[in-house]
Image (cartoon, rainbow, N blue to C red):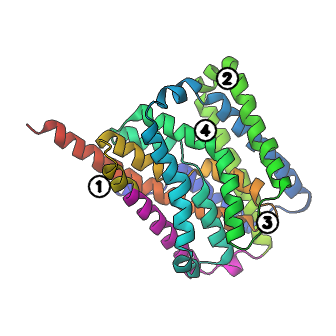
Amino acid sequence: MPLRRFLPDGFTCALLTTVVLASLWPCRGHAAIAFNGLTDVAIALLFFLHGAKLSREAVVAGMTHWRLHLTVLASTFVLFPLLGLLLRPLLSPLVTHDLYLGVLFLCTLPSTVQSSIAFTSMARGNIPAAICAASASSLLGIVITPLLVGLMLESHGQGGMSWDAIGKIVLQLLVPFAAGQVMQRWIGRWVEQHRGLLRYVDQGSILLVVYTAFSTAVLQGLWKQMPLPVLGGLLLVNAVLLTLALVATRYGSRALGFDRDDEITIVFCGSKKSLASGVPMAKVLFAGHPLGAIVLPIMLFHQIQLMTCAVLARRYAQRGEMVVSSP
């Protein structure tokens, strides 16, 4: 297997470059205010375009496979949070208090859309069901994730969600998304035809949030408080969470009687966590918290899940070819 398949993609390199830039030249003063305002606009535009792109017809058509979708949602919004809470006594000593708060936030996030569908397609799974499951997870996550974060904060001794935070979520995430859904009739086809625009807005908003978050964190002494053993511990924590999720979705789907195509969809939709949703939502939900430490776990998890699922998808595809070719 070529080594380049395990190398980080262009966006991951851009993320690393952004972290380096924020570490060397953090924005402060009036520049920080300007970057924060630009980031808020980019996040609102991001959710507006996602609302305009999400096909209501695809969601309605896919809802007939309700057992699969409930299984994916249970993995995303029940299994992951339970793992984060139950494993806290074992895993939290490996990282700092703030980093494990970021891990708990990671556990509440919705599934990815693009990569879940791409890996399901690569593995030759149920693509229509993957489109519906990933889209539903992304949509419901706008509501479910903040509620779960409130519960997680209370369990982590941070206090619950404030009404001010809920109002910011509604204004910055739900309102633009709803506006995009309303406008879908007129601009949905254009957004679909120019999906590259959505990718640039996706990635651009994430890079902006990462730069402003790490700028603030660096000025507060992030790297002085985070030695290499702690970063190694965070990698281990992420690897444990992903491994348990992959094992649970694979064997859980088989125990529930799903066929191979549906199993693939459940594995790749139920084990993912969305960086595109997570970083913008963290900015809204964790005002006043050390945001750099909050988003670092999802940044690392993003790369680990891409590399791991790429290998797993190829194995599923190879096994499918063997089944088809056998007499």
Q: Residue at x 80, y 51 (%)?
A: 166
The numbered dot on residue 1 is 1
The secondary structure type at the circle numbered 3 is helix
Residue toward you, 118 or 327? 327
**Along the line of sight, which residue is nearer the eye, 324 or 306?**
324
Amino acid type at circle 1 is Met
Residue in view at x 77 percent, y 53 percent: 284
Nearest to the eye among marks 2 and 4: give it. 2
Task: Give the left or right position of residue 24, taking residue 256 as reference.
Answer: right
| Disc nearest the viewer among 4 and 1 | 4
Quick one: label 1 or label 2, which is nearer the N terminus?
A: 1
Answer with the quarter of the image where residue 181 lies: top right
Q: CA distance from mark 2 to mark 4?
A: 18 Å
Tell me the CA gap for discs 4 and 1. Answer: 29 Å
Q: Which residues are magenta?
A: 221-248
Q: Nearer the viewer, mark 2 or mark 3?
A: 2
Secondary element under disc 1, as helix, strand or loop, is: loop
Sequence order check, earlier mark of 4 and 1: 1
In the visual, does 230 lie left or right of 248?
Answer: right
Residue 232 among magenta residues: yes
